[in-house]
Amino acid sequence: MRTFPMFLRMDGRRFGHFGVAFAGRLRDMLAQQVWKSPRHAFGGASISLTGATVKVQTQTGTDPAQGKPGHIALVGAGPGARDLLTLRALQRLQEADVIFYDRLVDPDLLDLAREGAQRIYVGKELGTAAWSQARIDRMIVAEAAHGKRVVRLKSGDPSIFGRATEEIDAARAAGISVEIVPGITAASAAAAATCHALTERGETDTFVITTGTCRPGDAEPDRALLARPGTAIAFYMSVEKVAKVQADLLAAGAPASCPVEIIASVSTPRERRVETVLADLAETVRENGIVNPAILMVRYPKSLAREMASKTRSAA
């Protein structure tokens, strides 16, 4: 297999002349390679809505009208920067017949897709229901049922707050093969942006990913379980609940001086980074006009727990 360097970082909204040429060459090289390995080729089951062929198609995974298998790939687009897309994700974009992409996916990533692939925006906007999850499930299944190779392109990693389970269940219920192509999640990108490891030997040996936005009607996560010495916590989709997050952690015993890093629009040209402490978290978010997408990285180092315990003993 031919190899090629992945050294070009293409920031900004457009590739530029050199970037476009690079994307074209990369697309051509991948087109020569992606079908050589059966392990990575799309494949699986599809269905027909005509009663006479349902049984045969479910067993063979082939649409008789087109003679090829349908498949769904849930692909992680990474946190934003195009050069953080994985090679396998790039391959899936090259193989796709139709791509359903989310609101936070950089549209320029679609320039790397196969020429002729259909691109369909299915982003969910706050307060609107134009693209409900059930509707998306039906659409990706319907396309795959016609023998198409479907990419469901999601920001970050599809398995982290990406509603992957609903789409996997829908595919399997229809007898369609489905896979997850992992992507770099926002917490990892935040660690890279701040050059601050997610865990630190002797200080933070537990790493937690949680959210401030649950399904309507569900109870919020028990944050008392998170306020433990040696824990680093990445809060996703929590800007609107930042005051509640702060209050819950403080009430559970996390020191007010716990260091916090706020990283908004990580790995994009709009990236912003702000440092504060837990006691000032909500005020810092408000004063700096931080909006989603943003990661709140809260750390409770063991050394801070020892320091607080020593002060308590001294005061006694």
Image: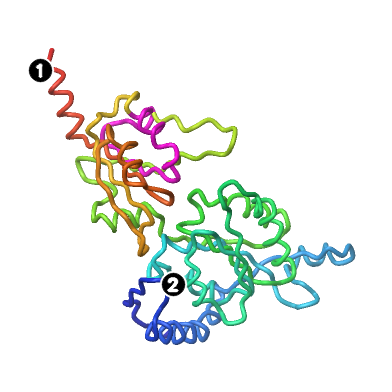
Q: Which residues are magenta?
A: 224-249
Q: What is the x, y in percent for residue 165?
A: 59, 50
Cα distance between the residues tagged 2 and 1: 56 Å
Q: Is residue 245 magenta?
A: yes
Of the pair 208 and 18, the residue shown nearer to us = 18
- In the rendered structure, find residue 76 and report the number of the disc placed on it: none
Q: Count residues near mark 1 (Cα–Cα under 10 Å), then give few for <14, some for 14-19, many for 20+.
A: few
Q: As drawn, which residue projects farthest toward the top?
A: 316
Q: What is the x, y in percent for residue 244?
A: 41, 31
Amino acid at pointer 1: Ser
Instruction: Name the residue rendered at 37%, 83% in the picture.
Output: 4
The residue that disc 2 covers is 87
| Residue 208: quarter of image | top left
Instruction: Name the residue rendered at 17%, 29% in the picture.
Output: 306
Amino acid at pointer 2: Leu
Q: Count residues near mark 2 (Cα–Cα under 10 Å), then give few for <14, some for 14-19, many for 20+.
A: few
| Residue 118: quarter of image | bottom right
